[in-house]
């Protein structure tokens, strides 16, 4: 149970987290104090182009009061276990605190579920205005129960929305468009595989591997989006060449090493395939999987993609030119921005949980879960993408 709770956090961005994200999120120097946004001022629209072809979409998520007309809010960020994506997210929240005038306290629990709930219990007795709590369906009821006597505390989800047994949201939140994130990766692969391999392998002759964790709905959506594009193009093949690998099946569960071992064994047992397509629903697993393909001498006939582009940026900076060709990404600073805007709307009484962001609500739903925009990041444009996303604070709050 402890491992499931903690590792479920692998879901998004988020780079994704992990993770889905931008580890080089814009940093405001400590010596500089960002100018306070004007009262009730939304982010400027539209933001300027970077000149490199990227425009960060304006978040149409409501107004807020002048943050510096009040005392700082106190916000707790509580997660079961810190993975790379969570540090990126924490850094983004700290940066945004300088703009929105709040103090962030972050708590992680090294995969200890009991300690995780104890922290929430203690925090519920303190003077927090809001809590961002990462949990999943199996454990969220306990979080709600702990905070049932503190309706004044705004509770907001982390990467994974709070949902019912039918996966319908039971509170507002911010998340990744998981299905379409998977789609964009396979679309890029199908468009570029022939040129990448020099036409030496037909796409009907490849094996396909997805790396995910069983029981995590968001990761299933990423896998389905990825595979549905291939299924639509090659309906006669079906799933006969598809290998859905669960990273929990290895003793080194959910690590890059687990992905490496699973991919190595799968490829060795299926030598009939002339090349491979691989998608890591979490970036760390794509890294392990692509290393296996490259070590087996299949890098020149394989293409690997990932949900999020963080680790791969460092590889490219150091000259990497292997089969991991890109990932779909959302800057963590944008994820944090959307989350904080939602919290402010609720704290300031501009909206209730039921009325927050109706313009972004899915049909038939009671609550809105805002889907973050995303970009397919590849080697030919990653420098411009990273440079631009690093300017997010400068652009949005100038």
Image (tube, rainbow, N blue to C red):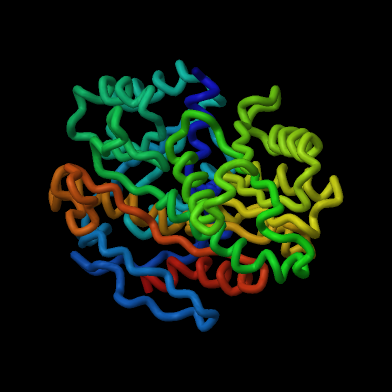
State the residue in front, 123 or 111: 111
| Side (left or right) of 354 relative to 275 | left
Q: Is residue 287 visible?
A: yes
Q: Is residue 188 above or below residue 277?
A: below
Q: Nearer the viewer, residue 66 or 154?
A: 154
Residue at (30, 69) in percent of width and height: 43
In the picture provided, is 8 more to the left or to the right than 363?
right
Above or below for 261 versus 67: above
Left or right relative to 224: residue 276: right
* Image-quadrant location for residue 41: bottom left
Which residue is at 45% across, 44% downward?
Answer: 221
> Residue 20 versus residue 225: which sits nearer the camera?
225
Position of residue 231 measured from the top left corner of the image (x, y, whole percent): 52, 51
Q: Is residue 389 above or below residue 180?
A: below
* Left or right placement of residue 330 versus residue 209 in this view: left
Residue 88 makes an appearance in the image: no
The extreme bottom residue here reads 51
Expressed as whole percent of the image width and height from the top left, the position of residue 392 reads: 45, 67
Quarter of the image containing the C terminus?
bottom left
Q: Residue at x 28, y 30 (%)?
A: 164
Q: Is residue 379 above or below residue 357?
A: below
The residue at the point 44 percent across, 49 percent down is 178
Q: Quadrant of residue 372?
A: bottom left
Q: Position of residue 393 (x, y in %)?
A: 43, 66
């Amino acid at each position: 149970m402890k491992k499931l709770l903690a590792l479920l956090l692998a879901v998004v961005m988020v780079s994704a987290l992990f993770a889905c994200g931008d580890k080089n999120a814009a940093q405001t120097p400590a010596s500089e104090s960002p100018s306070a946004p004007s009262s009730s001022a939304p982010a400027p629209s539209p933001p300027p182009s970077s000149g490199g072809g990227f425009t960060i979409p304006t978040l149409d998520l409501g107004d807020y009061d002048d943050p510096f007309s009040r005392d700082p809010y106190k916000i707790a960020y509580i997660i079961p276990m810190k993975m790379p994506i969570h540090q990126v997210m924490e850094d983004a929240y700290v940066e945004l605190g300088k703009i929105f005038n709040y103090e962030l306290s972050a708590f992680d629990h090294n995969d200890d579920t009991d300690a995780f709930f104890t922290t929430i219990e203690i925090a519920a007795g303190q003077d927090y205005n809001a809590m961002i709590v990462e949990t999943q369906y199996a454990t969220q009821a306990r979080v709600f129960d702990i905070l049932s006597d503190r309706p004044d505390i705004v509770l907001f989800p982390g990467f994974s929305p709070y949902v019912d047994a039918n996966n319908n949201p039971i509170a507002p939140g911010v998340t990744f468009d998981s299905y379409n994130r998977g789609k964009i990766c396979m679309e890029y692969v199908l468009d570029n595989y022939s040129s990448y391999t020099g036409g030496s392998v037909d796409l009907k002759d490849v094996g396909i591997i997805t790396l995910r964790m069983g029981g995590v709905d968001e990761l299933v959506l990423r896998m389905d989006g990825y595979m549905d594009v291939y299924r639509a193009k090659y309906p006669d093949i079906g799933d006969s060449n598809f290998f859905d690998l669960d990273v929990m099946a290895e003793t080194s569960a959910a690590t890059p090493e687990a992905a490496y071992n699973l991919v190595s064994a799968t490829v060795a047992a299926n030598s009939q395939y002339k090349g491979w397509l691989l998608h890591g629903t979490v970036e760390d697993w794509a890294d392990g999987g692509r290393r296996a393909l490259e070590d087996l001498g299949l890098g020149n006939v394989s293409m690997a993609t990932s949900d999020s582009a963080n680790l791969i940026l460092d590889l490219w900076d150091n000259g990497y030119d292997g089969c991991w060709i890109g990932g779909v990404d959302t800057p963590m600073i944008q994820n944090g921005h959307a989350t904080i805007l939602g919290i402010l709307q609720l704290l300031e009484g501009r909206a209730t949980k039921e009325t927050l962001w109706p313009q972004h609500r899915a049909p038939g739903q009671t609550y809105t879960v805002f889907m973050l925009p995303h970009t397919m990041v590849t080697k030919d444009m990653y420098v411009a993408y990273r440079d631009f996303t690093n300017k997010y604070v400068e652009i949005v709050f100038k």
